[in-house]
Each structure stands twice: as C-alpha cells, then as structure tokens.
Image (cartoon, helix red, strand yellow):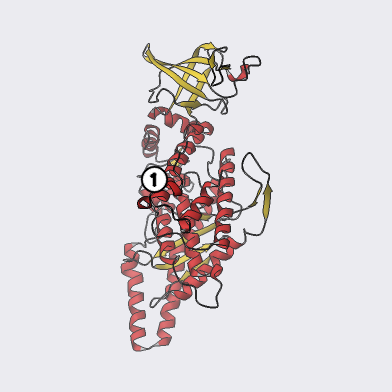
Amino acid sequence: MSLLTTLLRLEAAETEQAQDASTIRHFHLTERPMVFLPLNRSGTEATPLAVMYGDDRSRPQLLVAPPRGRPTEFLDDLADGILTYIDSFQHTTERLPARGSRPARQRYTHAPQLLVANRKSVPYIERLGRALRFTETPEGTDPARSIGRLGQWLTFFAEHAEYPGSAFLPALTELLTSHWVTGQSPLEDEHLAALMAWIRPPAGTTGLHAALAAEDPQLRRPAGPATDPSFDTFELDPLLTAYDTAAEEGNTAAMTRHTDRLRDLLHTYLHPTWNDAWQALALLRSLPQTPDAHRRWDADRDRFTAYSTYLADDGRPQPIKDDAVSAARRLARLEQAQGAFEARRAMEDPFVMAERRTSGEALAGTVIDTDPHHTITGPSGRPLLRPRFTLHTTDPVRLDTGSLLAGPHNPRVHAAIRSITPRDGGTDLLLEITTLTGTVAKPKPDSVPAVEDHLFLTLAPEFFRQPPFPSRDDTPWTHGGPQHDHPAAALEAAEEAQP
C-alpha cells in the first residue's frame, strides 16, 4: 500500500465515506461480459457446489451440483453454457495488414470476458480448470464441447489474469478499489456488498454504516468461492444430511424435495451478489476508459485468437507444470508487462503518477537549463542529435543513471538519465532525449522542453524489455529443451508471436 493510498484510507475512516482515488478506468469492459459466481463445497479444493453465471442481468443461470455422486451432469451443463458463450466470439474476424516483420493476419473482432466478484475467485477458477482440463472426452462426443475443453479455457482465463493489464478475468473488487479507497481493511474490501456500500451508500447514511449493514450474514453473505461458515452450519449441512438420510432410505420423493430446497437455498444465497456485480459493472462503466486500455484489449484479442487457433490445430491441454524454459520466459514476460503497465498507467492517470512520486519511481521538477544542439558520435562516425536538458526536483529520486524516462506532456519523447547530482536540498538530473530528436540539419525543437517548464516524468514503458533467451534447440535437456512436440512449446510460440 502506497503512502497516498494510506492517507486516503485514513481520511475515509475519519469521514466514514469512500474517497476517490482515480477518475479514469485502466481496464477494458466488453459490451457483453459474463458474470461468473462460483461456490465451492467446503473442505475440498475444487469441488463446485453451485455456479450462477450469465451475460444478461435479467436472466441469471444457476447450476447446482448434486448432493451426492459425481457432478458430471452439472459440469456438462456448465461446459455447454461457458463454451457457447466463448464460441459466440469466434465467428467474426478482422484483417490486420502486415507491419514490419509481422505478416498480415486475422483477429477476432471481439473476445469473451469473465467477471468474478473478488480476487479469491481467480485462483479458484485456476484450480477448477486444472482439475477439469485432463478429463477424457467420451467416445462419440465433440471434444470442442467437452468438460476437458472447459478446463482448458478456464486455465487460459486464469493464467492471463496474472498478466498485468489483461482484462480476460478481472475481479470486480480489484477494479473498484483501484478507483475508490474505503475506511476498512483490504481484506474487508473483498466483500463486494460491503465495498459497494462504502462507495454508494443509501441516502441518509454513511459508507461505514451501510457497510456494517451489508456485512450482516442474515442479509448478504460473501459469495464465493467459499461459503459463509454460519450458512454451512445452520442451513446447508442440515439440508445435505437430510438428503443423505433420504438417499439411504431410498425415499426418492424426499430426495427430490431436498434437491429443490437446495436449489432455492443457493439461489437465495447467490442472487444478492449477482445484483451487486451488475451494479458494480454499471458503476465502472460510468468512468472514462483510457486509450491504453483499448490497446491492451487488442492484445487480449490477439491472445484469444492465437489460443483458439491452437485448440483447433493441436488441442492438447496445458501441461501440469511449466518446464524450466517456459517458466523462465513466462516470468520474464510478466515482469516486463508489470513494469510497462504501471508506467503507462502513470502516464495517463495523475493519481498513479502521484503514487509513484512517493515511492521514487516518478518525479516532478522544473527545467533549469537546455542544450538543444548537443550531439554524440554515432556508430558510423556521423554526429547524432541528442538534445539535453537539466531538471531540478525536490522529489525523492530512486532511479539509476541510464534509466529511460517519459512524461504525459509528450509520451513519445524519451529521455535517458545521464547524471544525478544532489543540489540545494533537491536533485539535478541531466537528461538526454533519445527519440523524436530529428537530425542535426533538421532538428525537432518541440521535443525539447523550455526553461522553467514543469514536467512529470516516470520510467518509460519501453524501458522494460524482456531479456533475450536461448532457443529451445540451444537449451540443455536438463533445463527443458528441446521438446518441439511438447504443448508448452506450441503455446509459448503463440504467446511470443503477439505484439
């Protein structure tokens, strides 16, 4: 938690009202997302109790796992519902022209998006996908509509939820807390009803009192993936015990009656959170979306297209574990993406820029000197125009010489730090412009700030680059290569082909 967020949380606690943290949205919300609310059976890792899902607020779909036996029919119905939703995005494509070394290609014009209530639902979906993706497809059935294929897609969504900026599987509580800060703990913020009460309390009450009322287990229970302990003890367990007794006695009428009661009970449990989720979605839609969110969604559509193609061409499930090569490359991609994502957020959002200033990852300062005609000698021996300017700041500086900076005043202009000198209770940074400089004969003066200009700068997104890795052919077998026929290699190739 940053210093700025801590101060806002203290102010929210003092005023009993949520505080605005950001007025722009950094994640894309599709026109037709699917709200997905899973409940897990207590005491087991990934055994569903029920799921409420759908892409229409007025038509929630509720699936309830049987009290006894294997939930095959439940999973078949879930696979049919989710895969039908995914399939609806695999019919319309757009053609992207060749660009540089990248050939022309087709890309789906839209992509699916699953919205879950809270962060804990994301790893649950990952566990569920892992448990299902190796399920064998019965003979005579379509693998593309199978439980195993559902597991593969759930794994796909969960893996990309780890990718910074991806909007395939966002948690609503995470999106909301990036825009509003409450006076309760981050753990309490995971209760969607309480969080929404803080943000939009009923008229005549405060966020604190509205949240306390929303936390009443008799009114609204935290929906997913774990059930409320009091609900288990006083309502769910007695009903399941009664069902077991009826089953042992062979009383089919009682079994049917208890099954209907179970469905009604779980509908009553999940439906308030269903409404909260759609209210949260409407609230988030009211915020303007940043341009970079559109660009990241384009990258998500590329990944969706690539994975759909992989399933059609190969279709093998993701490995149980990454080999050493895949794990190293995946970690490097995530680190690079995290740095670039945070930098781009700072370029578009004053609140994020202010947060980064408190941590030394960004700074604000005044230009005190410029050298617009500074040159260096290029590799060919010819002079290259590299204008310089000096920025004085009183912010803490935790950046190194060589770091590449950019600012919202002109994001395409990058400036490398050439020296850092403490002076007069602050710091002087000598910065050298490396992009959009023009030539010695035809300089671009607009790239050089003027003396007394006040600038906000942070690490440029382009500063974060993935380190080079050897090919699988050059990797010893002890470290995962070469395995050209391994599904990890095909998935990795599809991932690295994205821009």
Residue 167 shows in this picture: no
Residue 32 on image: x %, y %:
60, 55
**Of residues 57 and 197, which is closer to you in this image?**
57
The x and y percentages for residue 340 are 48, 37
Q: State the quadrant of the N terminus.
A: top left
Residue 400 is left or right of residue 309, and the answer is left
Identify which residue is drawn at 45% across, 63% down: 270
Q: Residue at x 62, y 59 (%)?
A: 90
Q: Is residue 381 visible?
A: yes
**Could you classify mark 1 by the number of other residues whose Cα lies within 10 Å: few (under 14), some (14-19), or many (20 or more)?**
many
Image: 365 above or below 9 = above
Q: Which residue is mark 1?
A: 208
**Rendering coords of residue 108 (x, y %):** 63, 53
Question: Nearest the camera: 184 or 42?
Answer: 42
Q: In the image, is residue 446 above or below residue 156? A: above
Quadrant of the snapshot with the C terminus: top right
- Please provide percent x and percent y for residue 58: 58, 62
Task: Out of 220 and 108, give the one closest to the viewer.
Answer: 108
Residue at position x 43%, y 81% from top?
257
Tag 1 secondary structure:
helix
The residue at the point 67 percent across, 54 percent down is: 93
The type of residue carrying mark 1 is Leu
As drawn, is 183 to the left or to the right of 450? left
Tell me how many marks there are. 1
